[in-house]
Image: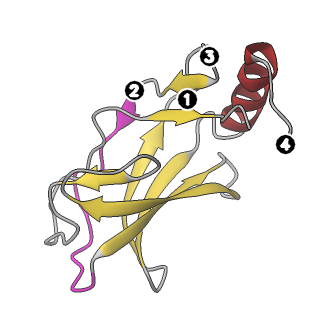
Amino acid sequence: MTTLSDAARNAAVEAVTDLVDGGTIEFQTAASAVVATLGLSDPAFGAAASGTVTANAITPDTDTTGNASPVTKAVFKAAGGATVWTVPVVEGSPSAGEIGLSSTVFNDGDEAKIISYTHTQPAS
């Protein structure tokens, strides 16, 4: 099994997260319907330490589209709209590798926000 050094993990996670500078996070249903679009800063993430970066300010969506089907994923997109990575979304407390929301169903005009987010490059 390959194991990355901290320097390699830091370089990898910074290279991936640099792709979403000035991009967006879309909350989507399983059928890929967009319910909310949040804005990412430029740069979107701070410097890496031990293979982990923390998101800079994320702009909330203050006028979401109501959805009957729950949000199941957060799609991180580059400024040009290309998908870079997708994270599962759950209601309540998330496990590692998930985003937890207080509710995965929004009414028209609700606010959607992420208070904090970290992204990690595993060592192996």
Residue appearing at x 58%, y 43% in the figure: 23
Dots 1 and 4: beta carbons under 8 Å? Answer: no
**How much space separates mark 3 and mark 2, taking CA atoms?**
21 Å
Residue appearing at x 45%, y 23% in the figure: 56
Q: Nearer the viewer, residue 35 or 51?
A: 51
Which label is found at residue 1? 4
Dots 4 and 2: beta carbons under 8 Å? Answer: no
Could you tell me which secondary element the residue under label 1 belongs to?
loop
- Vertical position of residue 25 compared to residue 116: above or below: below
Which label is found at residue 50? 3
Mark earlier in primary sequence (1, 4): 4
Residue appearing at x 86%, y 37% in the figure: 2
Residue assigned mark 2: 57
Residue 99 locus on image (x, y percent) = 36, 51
Q: Nearer the viewer, residue 75 or 9?
A: 9
Residue assigned mark 1: 44
Mark earlier in primary sequence (3, 1): 1
- Vertical position of residue 16 compared to residue 102: above or below: above
Could you tell me which secondary element the residue under label 4 belongs to?
loop
Foreground: disc 4 or disc 2: 4
